[in-house]
Amino acid sequence: MTSKADGAQRLSDLARLRRVRDRIDREYKQPLDVEALARGAHMSAGHLSREFRAAYGESPYGYLMTRRIERAMSLLRRGDMSVTEVCFAVGCSSLGTFSTRFTELVGVPPSVYRREAALATAGMPSCVAKQVTRPIRNREAPVTESH
């Protein structure tokens, strides 16, 4: 049985985790690391990582990269930016890391996605395109054969 104090502490921790998640959603383009996020939440980096994973099913870094990849998908569908431009526009500093994570989440490299997604979502309202092309979270995308 938990005490009232334990329950109040848990609610306080959840509120802090929600603020961290909201900060990631707002500032995904900024250079964010777990230590900086933890300082802002008045938690240790290890505690933040454990609690964030328990609450949201993935690490703060994983959540950040998912946000960046979602935004990258939207920019790539527009077709007016190169993969490199998109990489830096969403806050990634390494094209290699961006491409690897993109491929893990989406199932195809960003260059292939850029080429194919523009055709697949042509004429579709952007709000619908965003929903049907959302990256897979908490598991890797199935590997597809490219032709």
Image (spheres, helix red, strand yellow):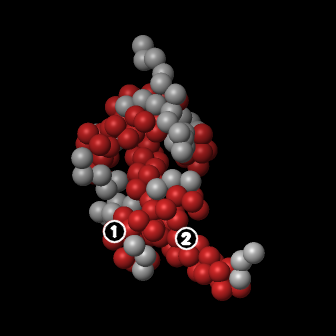
Residue at the spot of label 2: 18
Q: Nearer the viewer, residue 92 or 47?
A: 47
Res. 67 in view:
no
Q: Which residue reaches farthest front?
A: 1
Specify whether 62 is left or right of 11. Answer: left
The amino acid beneath tag 2 is Arg
Look at the image and tell me whether residue 17 can be seen.
yes
Q: How far from the left and from the top, in percent, is residue 58?
A: 51, 53
Residue at 38% from the left image edge and 28% from the top image edge: 112
Q: Which mark is residue 35?
A: 1
Looking at the picture, how far across and down is residue 43, in whole percent?
43, 76
**Residue at the (46%, 39%) spot, across then down:** 105
Quadrant of res 131: top right
Q: Is residue 119 above or below residue 86?
A: above
Amino acid type, residue under disc 1 in the picture: Glu
Residue located 62% across and 76% down the image: 10
Specify the quadrant of the image occupied by residue 3: bottom right
